[in-house]
Each structure stands twice: as structure tokens, then as C-alpha cells.
Image: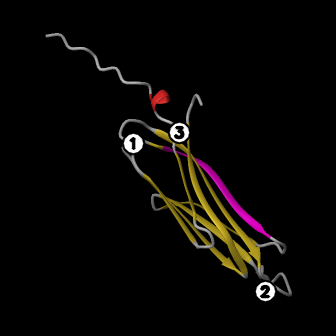
Amino acid sequence: MKTRPFIEKSDKQSVKPERWSVDAGGSGVAQLEIPPDLRRDRTFEISCSLAVAWRGSGSDEDEDKEPAAWHGLTLRVDGRQQWSRRVATHPGPGDSLDYRFRHRLPAGESLRLVAASEVKRSVRLALLLSAEEERPDG
């Protein structure tokens, strides 16, 4: 009895790039979980964006010279801190803090992303977290 080789379609032809996203609105935390793919490695471009509005009055600084209004964003990847910033919130209709990076995800592994925001004398308008799969040829 002869055996025939099993020929599988190319991943590039059979699978569309993955897109995952969550809009946490005015909530302080956004979580995104990407399930594993047992057949292939994947690379994602991760994007996180916090939009805020200044809610201050009077001086732009407290008595200890710290900005009166600020916003901060911390991004964790599988429980480890990837990035964190805290900046002064500028007076006006809106301000934001954004971060983008690439993450390689080996076959069989899942990915858990958590974006946590904090504000002082600012109002959260939106907290967005997304992951878009990158393909070498497309």
C-alpha cells in the first residue's frame, strides 16, 4: 500500500490576518485575550490609546510643583509590564497618550494584554486596545 503525502494549503492563502480589539470607553482598564493558534507563529502590532479631557481650574501646578492634572497608562503583556507613562494633561478639549509595539506569538501560545489608566483632575474619554496580525507578504 502506497501512502500519499498530505498537502495543506498555504497559511497565507487560507487564513486572513487576525484583528482583535476592545473599547473600554471611560473605564480605567481594558483587557484583550488572544487565543492560541496551534499551527503557526504570529506577529501582532499592538496599539493602545488613552484619550482624556482636562478637568481643572486655576493653576496648572499644585503647591508641590506637580502638574495639577495628569493622566497615565500602563500596559502589561502576559502579566509583565511592557510600558508605562504619566504625563501632564494639557488644558483644552482633549489630550491623549498612545503606545504601539510589535509582539511575536509562538504557535500554541495565547496572549493576554491589560491596559490600565489613571487620571488626576482629568476625565477619561476613551481607552482602546487592539492587536492586528502582520503578514510578511500582505
Label 3 neighbour load within 10 Å: few <14, some 14-19, many 20+: some
Q: Earlier in the sequence, mark 2 or mark 1?
A: 1
Q: Dot 2: what SS?
A: loop
Circle 2 sits on which residue?
Answer: 62
Category of crowding for the residue at label 2, using alpha-carbon neighbours closer than 10 angstroms: few (below 14), some (14–19), many (at least 20): few
* 2 vs 1, front mark: 1
State if disc 3 and disc 2 touch (CB < 8 Å). no
The foreground one among 125 and 36 is 125
In the picture, residue 117 is in which quadrant? bottom right
Density class for disc 1 (Cα within 10 Å; few <14, some 14-19, many ≥20) is some
Dot 1 or dot 3: first in sequence order is: 3
Q: Is residue 121 left or right of residue 23?
A: right
- Span shown in magenta: 94-104
Look at the picture and state if 132 lies above or below 92.
above
Q: Is residue 114 left or right of residue 90?
A: left
Quarter residue 56 falls in = bottom right
From the top left corner, tell me how far across and down residue 90 is, in percent.
Answer: 81, 72
Residue ID for mark 1? 37
Quadrant including the N terminus: top left
Q: Is residue 115 left or right of residue 58?
A: left
The quadrant of the image that shows the C terminus is top right
The residue sitting at 84% across, 73% down in the picture is: 92
Image disc number at residue 136: none
Question: Which residue, given by chain and number where applicable, does mark 3 sit on?
Answer: 17
User: Compared with residue 13, is residue 17 higher up or lower down, i.e. above or below?
Assistant: below
Horizontal and vertical percent position of residue 99? 66, 56
Main SS of the magenta part reads: strand
Mark 3 belongs to which amino acid? Pro
Residue 16: x, y in percent? 51, 36
Q: Residue furthest top?
A: 2
Above/below status of 64 relative to 112: below
Give the CA separation, mark 1 to mark 3. Answer: 12 Å
